[in-house]
Image (cartoon, rainbow, N blue to C red):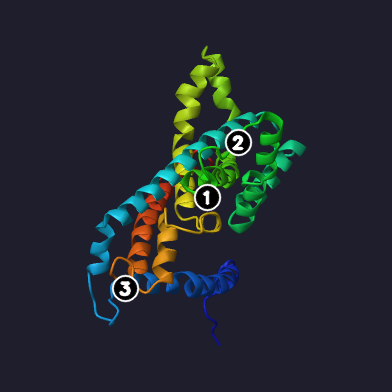
Amino acid sequence: MTSGPPLSADAHPRRGAALGLLPFGAFTFLFLAVPTVLAVGSGLYDADGHLTADNLIALGDPVILKTLGNSVWLAALTAALGTIGGAAICYALIGVGPESRLRTFVDAASGVLAQFAGVPLAFAYIAAFGLSGLVTVWLQDTFGFDLYASGAWIYEMPGLIAPYVAFQLPLMVIVFLPALDALRPEWAEANAILGGGRATYWRRVGLPVLAPSLIGAALLLFANAFSAYGTAAALISQGSQIIPLQIRAALSSETVLGHANLAGALALAMIAIMAAVMALYAALDRRASRWRR
């Protein structure tokens, strides 16, 4: 009686790992892939179910272009502020050990605050800086300073900057701090032995090594802000200043600008921009991973 070739030692663990991924794969397929395909595909059909390019042509409408420009501007600005502020926080933590209480607190707070967005963040923002918010009333009573002398800006595009930065900063700390931890002490020692100062080290070693991670983190923050919806929807109840709110308006009415299913075309535009940004992020992350090994 002959027996077959023996199974390799890692055959069963690999099979178990593949089976363990099935629930996640099913969840991703049902709640991410299928809705995305249906949403995007709907933009290619008219109200009678016939293929049409009218919805894609409607993306060139000045109103849509302005909304898209607002989304890009808001995402770029908050990504830049989050990148600079988050990188400064990470730099301040370089000398703190990974097991220290301060580092543990910062890591935990960043993980919580990065997820504190949407309606809860909008409510906290209104409670603090709204027309009758705590900070607004305190500034008025203490210093006679009126935050709303020029109008109710909190419910317009400028009012989205501060809450967006509030969840961009902790996300930057989560993403960029491991890159700073990957800087090897021997690099700084070699720089010092060769007579280089701190400025020389950061100019010729630190920044070139960190550049892919820094740019990649900025792209991730841009994508995060560009696709954010909950906070803007809670703060801005009228008007569609950014693309996610424009999609909401298209879904809540039968036609927008005379085109049915325009929401699908808007979603397609968003997905195309997000895909390009995330492709650049993935490429930079692969390049930066060489220095984290």
Q: Residues within 10 Å of mark 2 (few under 14, many from 20)?
A: some
Q: Of callouts 2 and 3, which one flags the residue occurring earlier in the amino acid sequence?
A: 2
Q: Amino acid at mark 1?
A: Tyr
Mark nearer the N terminus (2 vs 1): 2
Foreground: 175 or 68?
A: 68
Q: Which mark is residue 155?
A: 1
Task: Give the label, 2 or 3, closer to the camera.
Answer: 2
Residue at the disc numbered 3:
260
Label 3 vs label 1: CA separation? 29 Å
Tag shown at residue 146:
2
Provide residue 75's location: percent of width, then percent of height: 44, 46
The residue at 47%/29% (across/down) is 207
Q: Is residue 175 above or below residue 261?
A: above
Q: Is residue 230 left or right of residue 265?
A: right
State which tag comes first along the sequence, 3 or 1: 1
SS for tag 3? Answer: loop
Q: Is residue 8 visible?
A: no
Say above or below: 238 vs 16. above
x 58%, y 21%: residue: 189
Res. 55 image quadrant: bottom left
Position of the N terminus, as image quadrant, is: bottom right
- Residue 270 circle label: none
